[in-house]
Image (cartoon, rainbow, N blue to C red):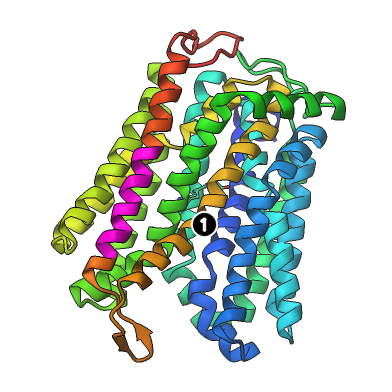
């Protein structure tokens, strides 16, 4: 019981439940790769209808980031996250039990809708329970849990499917999500005061909820601020290219240019994702210690652009270097989630969810756009070769795709540098005070 009545312990349990639900979001988001064969057999789908089932999640997720932020600020992180987790989990159960494609599609739509609130709600919770000089670490740690959820959608999900079947696995994830929803409702209160607890030292007393008229003003203030667009455009490139290469074209590139198996290729992506888990938490922690945000974002965007420039320049990079580059570049890219910390710190406390939702939207629009852009580049250099009906792309095609990724990285770096220069004159993060200040 002391666990729940001590605000310093309670905040970790509340956050743990929220990120457990966010872990499920990431798992569902990436699950179609492993589920695809089963779904084709169960519903006799074409590649197009399977693609629709997969991509509908991303479109819904992107479209609902702003409403998710508004709901979180208006009704609180607890109510919004518990409802979202329950909707997502009911969708997973419906998906697992579906007897037709339409029911499965409806279930997947519910999963996407419910899932869309959890990242924003988890960060809004952190804004109310953690000090400003802890928020960078919490942003990074939340992001890292997202990467872990994506990892769970690979071999662990495949093992679960082989033991429980795809339907049993989906229903199981749904039941786990419903349990998380109940836990969030019981424990993840909007603030220490809302939970009836003593305040936490140096955590400013924040409004649990914001009224609708004030929220409208916050949205118009945010969209008029150039920094919002610089952060959003930077995330558009970074999330878009990252998700496209690590979620889609990375495996075909390794298989087709190095002649290795899909299983072997997936090990290199796994190594990259391990880096992707370490980087955000490490950079968040460093950022809080150093009182530095935008300089770290600049560093990460430059490393990102240079990484893809290496692949664009050399095409077939030796495999040991591929592993090393994937690992280190993903670690060093860990400064990017600080974008959410920066936007939160530029606006009033009651707008945290809304402004985080606004910039996150742009990242996920990138994730919808770049698979098509890089796919078109590969198709443009395709020479007509196929193996077992699958297109085999040329090394030149991959180099052009990587050159686009490098150019996207440079544009992201330009946004980050501009942001850094514009915000340099503002006061640095004051640690240990009850004031939140714009950083850098
Ligand atoms: N972990 C990220 C998603 C991501 C980016 N690159 C690979 N995965 C994340 O948490 N993004 C925010 C969200 O809304 O999921």
Image quadrant in which you'd find residue 44: bottom right
Task: Please determine whether, in this image, residue 279 is positioned above or below residue 346.
Answer: below
Give 163 or 56, whichever is nearer the viewer: 56
User: Label 1's element?
Assistant: helix
Residue sitting at x 49%, y 71%: 157
Assess whether residue 410 is covered by the magenta stretch: yes
**Quadrant housing the N terminus:** top right
Give the left or right position of residue 283, taking residue 14 as reference: left
Residue 261 visible to the viewer: yes
User: Which residue is at 66% across, 62% downward?
Assistant: 176
Q: Ligand 1 within 8 A of label 1's CB?
A: no
Residue 440 appears in the rendering:
no
Q: In the rendered view, would you say 414 is above or below 235?
A: above
Residue 203 placed where, x, y %? 63, 17
Magenta segment, principal secondary structure? Answer: helix
The reply to whether the magenta stretch includes residue 231 is: no
Magenta-colored span = 398-411
Q: Which residue is the site of mark 1?
A: 369
Tell me where residue 114 appears, x and y as whole percent: 72, 55
């Amino acid at each position: 019981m002391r666990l729940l009545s001590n605000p310093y312990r309670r905040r970790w349990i509340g956050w743990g439940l929220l990120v457990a639900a966010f872990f499920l979001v990431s798992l569902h988001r990436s699950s179609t790769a492993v589920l695809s064969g089963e779904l084709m057999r169960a519903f006799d789908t074409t590649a197009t209808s399977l693609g629709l089932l997969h991509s509908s999640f991303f479109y819904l997720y992107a479209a609902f980031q702003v409403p998710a932020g508004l709901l979180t600020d208006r009704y609180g992180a607890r109510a919004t996250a518990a409802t979202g987790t329950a909707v997502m989990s009911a969708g997973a159960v419906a998906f697992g039990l579906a007897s037709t494609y339409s029911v499965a599609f409806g279930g997947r739509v519910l999963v996407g809708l419910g899932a869309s609130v959890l990242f924003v709600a988890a960060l809004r919770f952190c804004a109310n329970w953690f000090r400003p000089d802890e928020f960078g670490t919490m942003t990074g740690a939340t992001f890292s849990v997202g990467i872990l959820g994506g990892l769970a959608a690979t071999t662990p999900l495949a093992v679960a499917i082989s033991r429980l079947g795809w339907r049993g696995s989906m229903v199981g994830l749904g039941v786990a999500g419903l349990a998380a929803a109940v836990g969030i409702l019981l424990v993840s209160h909007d603030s220490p005061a809302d939970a009836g607890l003593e305040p936490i030292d140096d955590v400013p007393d924040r409004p649990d909820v914001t009224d609708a008229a004030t929220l409208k003003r916050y949205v118009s203030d945010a969209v008029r601020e150039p920094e919002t667009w610089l952060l959003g455009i930077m995330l558009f490139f970074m999330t878009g290219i990252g998700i496209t290469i690590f979620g889609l074209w990375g495996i075909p590139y390794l298989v087709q240019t190095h002649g290795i198996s899909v299983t072997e290729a997936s090990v290199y992506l796994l190594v990259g994702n391990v880096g992707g888990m370490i980087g955000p938490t490490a950079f968040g922690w460093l950022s809080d210690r150093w009182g530095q945000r935008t300089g770290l974002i600049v560093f990460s965007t430059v490393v990102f652009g240079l990484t893809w420039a290496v692949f664009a320049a050399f095409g077939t990079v030796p495999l040991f270097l591929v592993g090393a580059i994937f690992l280190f570049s993903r670690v060093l890219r860990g400064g990017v989630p600080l974008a959410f910390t920066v936007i939160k710190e530029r606006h009033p406390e009651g707008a945290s969810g809304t402004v985080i939702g606004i910039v996150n939207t742009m990242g996920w629009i990138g994730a919808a756009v770049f698979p098509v852009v890089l796919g078109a580049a590969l198709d443009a250099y395709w020479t007509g070769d196929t193996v077992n009906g699958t297109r085999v792309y040329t090394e030149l095609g991959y180099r052009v795709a990587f050159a686009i990724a490098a150019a996207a990285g440079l544009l992201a770096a330009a946004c980050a540098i501009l942001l850094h220069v514009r915000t340099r004159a503002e006061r640095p993060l004051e640690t240990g005070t009850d004031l939140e200040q714009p950083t850098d």
